[in-house]
Image (tube, coloured by chain):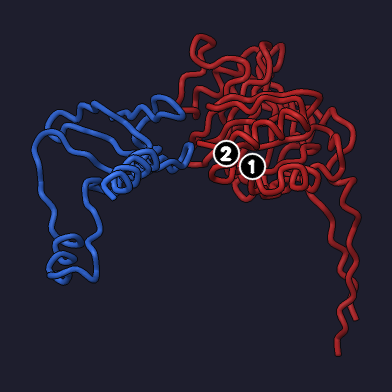
Chain colours: A red, B blue
Amino acid sequence: MADLALQARTPLQDLARPGRFGAATAKPGLLIEERTDLALATVMARRGREHDLNRAVAAAYGIDLPHGPHVAAKDGVSFAGIGVQRWLAAAEGLVEADFVDRLRQRLAGLASIAEQTDGWAVLRLRGDRVRDVLAKGIPIDLHPSRFATGDVALTVVAHIGVQIAQLDDRPTFQLMAFRSLAASLWSWLSKSAAEFGYEIVPSGSPGRRTDRITTTKRSINSD
Amino acid sequence: MRIICPYCGERGNEEFSYLGDASLLRPDPAGAGAMHAFADYVYLRDNPRGSHREFWYHAAGCRSWLIVTRNTSTHDITRVEFACDVAAARMASFEDEG
């Protein structure tokens, strides 16, 4: 009989520890925050139900689904366009602990929903040199005249598929990759940011994802 | 070479993968001469110089299948369409013909 204690871990838990790293610049050029409080799900419209889906999302969340690579947000819930009739829905701070289940109920018959909550590493990036860091890997133009607040892009960084969005005019960018590639993304990001100096800040939002998942204990009968 | 994806905008071709000729139509397996028609469909390709309609998949972006009209001698791209739109239009024209 053995007890296995499974503990939830964030994708960058062992890699991105809070602190100051890289060149000893007067001020860190990049601030990095791992977001661990987002409930995530992909939403794919069922054929012929596109208009009903638009209406249902507007009624439930007060959001007009973006038709293009943009993100629309309200009250901590957002829908980002990631392809034709496909979106990534996100809820900050687990606005509703059962966000994805409720999404599935509210959009039943109109869209296919796939839970993604623990599948992605999510980083929020800001600072005076954020565009200079991103320019080392992101092959698309992030100049404010071409990529502005509310824009979303799926592209590659160092052969890693990523989703990038600009969240505000500061600017703050959100960079996401599948969690199995988090260490590779971190390798690129930490080296690219080193010359400017960077600071890893603790996740600022309450309701860390790990708190929701209770430690699972399972007994295995050796018989 | 850069492709203007109708969803994502202009991207480098490293984000796409290439399938080939988009003008091929799968033969009717029950039709007369199906064996020869399939051999042609699977193995034989023209090697045109000039305008060519071809499938590209935006693998590292929106994951859409696209039909790109490209000049094979200059690489000029004159048109990019969603393959699903082209297929839907083709189905509609078949239905119109009865």
Type of amino acid under label 1:
Val
Q: Foreground: A36 or A54?
A: A54
Answer yes or no: is residue A190 visible: no
Q: Position of residue B11 (x, y in %)?
A: 39, 28
Residue assigned mark 2: A86
The quadrant of the picture occupied by the N terminus of chain A is bottom right
Name the chain letter of the residue that bears numbered label 2: A
Name the chain letter of the residue that bears numbered label 1: A
Residue assigned mark 1: A43
In the rendered view, does A194 fall on the left or right side of A74?
A: left
The label shown at residue A200 is none
Locate residue A184: give its quadrant.
top right
Q: Position of residue A69 (x, y in %)?
A: 54, 27
Locate residue B87: give its quadrant.
top left
In the rendered view, does B1 fall on the left or right side of A82?
A: left
Going 88% across and 70% down the picture, which residue do you hit?
A218
Q: Residue furthest bottom?
A: A223
Q: Foreground: A186 or A152?
A: A152
Q: Residues under labels 2 and 1: Cα distance?
A: 6 Å
